[in-house]
Amino acid sequence: MGGMVSGVRVGLRWAGSALLWAGALAGVLGLALFVGVRSGYVQTLVVISGSMQPTYHVGDGLVSRRVPASAVRVGDVVSARNADGVLVTHRVVGVEDGPGDARTLTLRGDANSGDDPAPYVVERTYVPVVTVPHAKAFVDVVRRPTVGIPLVVAACALVGFALVPSGGPRRQDDVPGGGTDEKPAPTHRYDQAS
């Protein structure tokens, strides 16, 4: 019975450790994404229409990086703000040199039969580099209290198990070659001035 309990503890400790590492990695990636978004070099968005199907589907998440308009070519997919300030992600079908460093872009959704109503005059724009299929559905599920709260509690429990120290010193039969893994207490000798 003790061996089974010990095995369960080891398994839970391993799972907690793995979750801790996964959480740390997610935290680092999340921090990098946060800094990128706050600095304007990265833009995240969720596709809300079918105008770019089959390339992007409704509910897909996109992570885009900022590029100068001079780097945009016909055939690229870009995200640019329209006259209403709404970020539109469509394919470039025309590029004209604009005033200064700006370019005038003509965009069209892959599923649309015609170009967007007005051209986009931009000095920089965003190009999608990562697509997360069904990101909106995942976020919607995790945001439900009946899912999110138990996930947080389970994650905290596994992290707690990973941080729990193992029992005391091992028994003689657990240490290869017999004996214990205890080290003798250090002794210090201090010279006393007379």
Image (cartoon, rainbow, N blue to C red):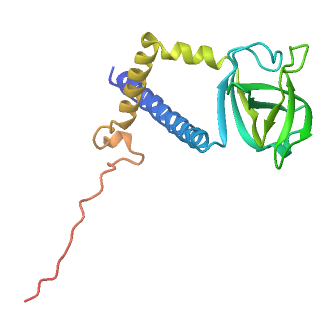
| Residue 139 image position (x, y, % from top left) | 56, 18
Q: Quadrant of residue 151?
A: top left
| Residue 46 image position (x, y, % from top left) | 66, 22
Q: Is residue 123 left or right of residue 76?
A: left
Nearest the eye: 153 or 192:
153
| Residue 152 image position (x, y, % from top left) | 41, 23
Nearest the eye: 149 or 58:
58
Q: Quadrant of residue 148?
A: top left
Q: Is residue 148 left or right of residue 81?
A: left
| Residue 123 image position (x, y, % from top left) | 77, 43
- What's the residue at 81%, 18% (across, down)? 52
On screen, 14 above or below 101?
Answer: above
Q: Quadrant of residue 87?
A: top right
Nearest the eye: 131 or 168:
131
Q: Is residue 138 left or right of residue 9?
A: right
The quadrant of the picture occupied by the C terminus is: bottom left
Instruction: Residue lying at the far top in this picture: please name it.
Output: 146
- What's the residue at 17%, 78% (across, down)? 190
